[in-house]
Image (cartoon, rainbow, N blue to C red):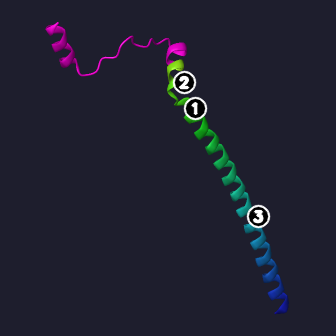
Amino acid sequence: MIAAIVIVSNLLTSWAYQQSGELMEVKRETQQLQRENDELRVEISKLETPERIYTTATKRLGMVAPSRILYGNQTDQAARGKRR
């Protein structure tokens, strides 16, 4: 009977250590993923700046910025053209 209790106790202790090790590994992995997520958020915020978007559009995509910006819909613009 005592031998069975010792064996069960050893098995439970071993299982607890194994679970503890797995938990530590999951925590390390979570921290690593959080660091990568933070780095990606910084990279996204850099890419979303208006200057970066303008540079990418003009230099890499060959787009040209308009010389003037018109506001309103096409009907408003057509009406203005007829009045002139």
Residue 6 is situated, as x and y percent measured from the top left of the image, at 83, 85
Q: Secondary structure at mark 3?
A: helix
Q: CA distance from mark 3 to mark 2?
A: 45 Å
Judge whether 59 appears above or below 26 on screen: above
Residue 8 is situated, as x and y percent measured from the top left of the image, at 78, 82
Of mark 3 and mark 1, the one earlier in the sequence is 3
Q: Is residue 16 left or right of residue 45?
A: right
Which quadrant of the figure has residue 10?
A: bottom right
Can residue 61 be found in the magenta stretch? yes
Q: Nearer the viewer, residue 61 or 73?
A: 73
Q: Secondary structure at mark 2?
A: helix
Residue occupying the point 65% across, 48% down: 33
Q: Nearer the viewer, residue 23 or 53?
A: 53
Q: Which mark is residue 52?
A: 2
Q: Is residue 61 left or right of residue 2?
A: left
Amino acid type of the residue tagged 2 in the rendering? Arg
Can residue 67 be found in the magenta stretch? yes
Residue occupying the point 74% across, 67% down: 20
Judge whether 81 appears above or below 47 on screen: above
Amino acid type of the residue tagged 3 in the rendering? Gly
Q: What is the magenta range?
A: 57-84
Q: Which mark is residue 77?
A: none
Of mark 3 and mark 2, the one earlier in the sequence is 3
Amino acid type of the residue tagged 1 in the rendering? Lys
Residue pointed to by mark 3: 21
Residue pointed to by mark 1: 46
